[in-house]
Image: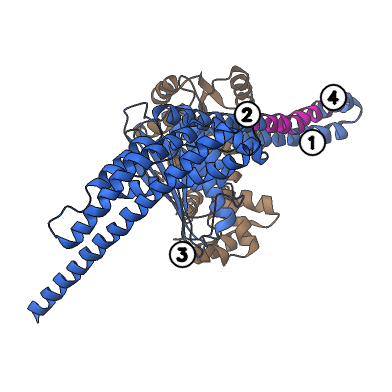
């Protein structure tokens, strides 16, 4: 019985090995054909460029460029799988506009011409490598000891060398990302300042005007009509209380005092206590973080908690704060109904923007039916060596 | 009654001194920073301290920390903390030693001079004075609790005022009922929440606050 099972396992192993080697044959043949096709495409592109001033060149390139990209991406995926590390592409984001504008943008993108260069190399050296690879894999089917992928491996390395973005392209895409996140940060800051100005103008400032008026009238009435003066003074007192309450709300929105007092962990604990939902806070963040990061992190967590209350229907939530070396990780989990997506106008997009200004990221797992988990990460260093791990329930 | 006052803004400090002295308090020392506060509290051992949360040199919760430190050295030292904001976290820290003689109020409560002076006296007498905002947040947070849901609206009103630290007499005056009616309500509240009964006002308030803070 035991021996039978071993034979069976060995049989399954042999079958797997055989089917893998057979698959390699197909891949080698497919790649050989594709490199031949690619060589044809290369010739068409070169011809298209040569006759671009004659109108026929333009439609030819309009068809060819997407094909080149598709072919290059196909090879990137294949080589990435074989080598075990994905090969990214670095095409510029296509601009809005008609087909001609897009074609012009593609023609100016250096990545396009690197692809075309690769087409040529792939159609010559690559063709030889894949044909050798095909022969090799057929031999591999016949002779067990034959190495499975020699030439194909070399081809994959060639693809990685020619098709992975070079340093310039990586820097350019980083610059683009930064320009975008800076523009968003500037926009949202301007909007925030406008909101504060409006709140002050319509709120506390207006109330102080009313307060002054009340006091003035009370001063006039104090001798002639003390009864009315008393009423006016009481009103003035109530107005000043309201003005203070509004200023408190406003300041809390700019920088919660408890954040300045106690740092991220204390502020999140205070928030958990003031929230009408049981929230467990599990924090291990040594020392204080840089003030701008602390504030971004706090508001991200606060927004995530506000989302839980508004949308999830959860009975309880949990906040986890971890800081290791140079990464702050914040997780907000709830037992609600799930189905949250950053695009659905749930405030998650706002958190993403806030974090992007500090190269932070947001990840949401929220299957329909829950639970939801929002993980936010911010690269940052702790500024003081003081250690204060703590946890509590609120 | 001897008071130590800590407030860094001269305008407010002078105002508070005037207000306290007009109500028969003796301000033995008025300080404007955390370290001086701790020194003043431990040397004068006043009947009550009135302390602003935010003080120099750090302009963070220096006042609160100094007050807590002083209470650690002199257990039960009556401290009334004033702030532009109320934080449940700070209320909890003040109440943590469960000995009473603490207050935590928004600065605007000073507007109502009578009530403010009552609060100072209450804290000096070992009682408690919690800002209505602290209590209403606590009650909102615990709104789902079965024992709290079982209270009648009137009992809830009484519970709220009691948690703020008011005596039965003050609650009766506030709700326009007799003191006997209030004590009937408090008995019923204590039974429903499963809390031990006590004749002492201060002990009852502390029990209620401990219950609400979970």
The numbered mark at residue A216 is: 4
Residue bearing mark 3: B194
Q: Residue at x 37, y 26 (%)?
A: A383
Q: Which residues are magenta?
A: A192-213
Which chain identifier belongs to the brown chain?
B
Q: Secondary structure at mark 3?
A: loop
The numbered mark at residue A5 is: none
Q: Residue at x 12, y 57 (%)?
A: A145
Residue bearing mark 2: B23
Tag 1 subunit: A
Splitting the image into 4 quarters, where does residue A128 fall? top left
Q: Are marks 1 and 2 in contact (CB under 8 Å)?
A: no
Asked whether residue B88 appears in the rendered view, the answer is: no
Rendered shade, chain A: blue
User: Height in image: A288 above or below B202?
Assistant: above
Tag 2 subunit: B
Mark pair 2, 4: CA separation = 27 Å
Q: Residue furthest right?
A: A224
Mark pair 1, 2: CA separation = 24 Å
**Residue A287: % across, % down:** 36, 31
Figure colour scheme: by chain
Splitting the image into 4 quarters, where does residue A162 fall? top left
């Amino acid at each position: 019985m035991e021996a039978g099972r071993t034979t069976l396992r060995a049989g399954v192993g042999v079958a797997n090995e055989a089917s893998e080697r057979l698959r390699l044959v197909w891949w080698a043949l497919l790649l050989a054909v594709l490199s031949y096709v690619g060589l044809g495409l290369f010739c068409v592109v070169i011809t298209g460029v040569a006759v671009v001033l004659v109108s026929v060149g333009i439609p030819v390139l309009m068809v060819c460029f997407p094909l080149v990209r598709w072919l290059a991406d196909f090879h990137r995926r294949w080589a990435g799988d074989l080598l075990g590390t994905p090969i990214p592409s670095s095409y510029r984001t296509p601009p809005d506009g008609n087909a001609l504008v897009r074609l012009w943008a593609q023609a100016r993108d250096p990545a396009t011409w690197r692809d075309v260069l690769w087409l040529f190399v792939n159609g010559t050296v690559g063709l030889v490598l894949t044909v050798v690879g095909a022969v090799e894999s057929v031999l591999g089917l016949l002779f067990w000891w034959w190495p499975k992928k020699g030439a194909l491996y070399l081809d994959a390395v060639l693809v990685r060398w020619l098709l992975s973005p070079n340093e310039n392209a990586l820097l350019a895409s980083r610059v683009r990302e930064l320009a975008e996140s800076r523009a968003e940060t500037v926009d949202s800051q301007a909007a925030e300042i406008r909101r504060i100005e409006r709140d002050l103008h319509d709120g506390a400032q207006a109330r102080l005007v009313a307060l002054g008026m009340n006091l003035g009238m009370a001063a006039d009435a104090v001798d002639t009509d003390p009864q009315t003066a008393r009423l006016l003074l009481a009103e003035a007192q109530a107005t000043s209380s309201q003005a203070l309450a509004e200023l408190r709300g406003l300041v809390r929105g700019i920088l919660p005092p408890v954040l300045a007092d106690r740092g991220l962990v204390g502020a999140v604990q205070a928030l958990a206590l003031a929230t009408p939902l049981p929230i467990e806070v599990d924090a291990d963040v040594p020392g204080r973080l840089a003030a701008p990061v602390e504030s971004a992190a706090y508001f991200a967590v606060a927004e995530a908690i506000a989302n839980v209350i508004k949308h999830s229907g959860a009975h309880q939530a949990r906040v986890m704060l971890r800081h290791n070396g140079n990464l702050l990780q914040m997780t907000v989990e709830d037992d609600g109904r799930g189905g949250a997506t950053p695009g659905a106008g749930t405030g998650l997009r706002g958190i993403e923007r806030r974090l992007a200004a500090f190269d932070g990221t947001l990840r949401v797992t929220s299957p329909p039916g829950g639970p939801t988990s929002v993980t936010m990460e911010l690269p940052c260093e702790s500024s003081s060596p003081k250690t204060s791990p703590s946890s509590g329930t609120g | 009654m001897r008071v130590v006052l800590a407030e860094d803004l001269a305008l407010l400090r002078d105002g508070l001194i005037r207000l306290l002295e007009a109500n028969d308090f003796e301000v033995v020392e008025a300080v404007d920073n955390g370290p001086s506060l701790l020194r003043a509290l431990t040397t004068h051992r006043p009947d009550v301290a009135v302390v602003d949360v935010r003080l120099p040199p750090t302009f963070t919760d220096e006042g609160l920390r100094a007050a807590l430190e002083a209470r650690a050295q002199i257990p039960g030292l009556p401290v009334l903390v004033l702030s532009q904001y109320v934080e449940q976290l700070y209320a909890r820290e003040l109440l943590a030693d469960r000995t009473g003689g603490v207050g935590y109020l928004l600065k605007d409560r000073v507007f109502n001079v009578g009530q403010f002076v009552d609060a100072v006296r209450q804290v000096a007498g070992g009682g408690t004075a919690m800002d209505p905002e602290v209590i209403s947040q606590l009650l909102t947070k615990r709104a789902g609790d079965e024992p709290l849901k079982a209270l009648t609206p009137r009992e809830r009103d009484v519970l709220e005022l009691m948690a703020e630290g008011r005596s039965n007499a003050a609650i009766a005056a506030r709700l326009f009922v007799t003191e006997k009616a209030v004590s009937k309500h408090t008995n019923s509240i204590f039974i429903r929440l499963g809390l031990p009964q006590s004749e002492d006002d201060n002990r009852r308030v502390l029990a209620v606050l401990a219950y609400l803070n979970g």
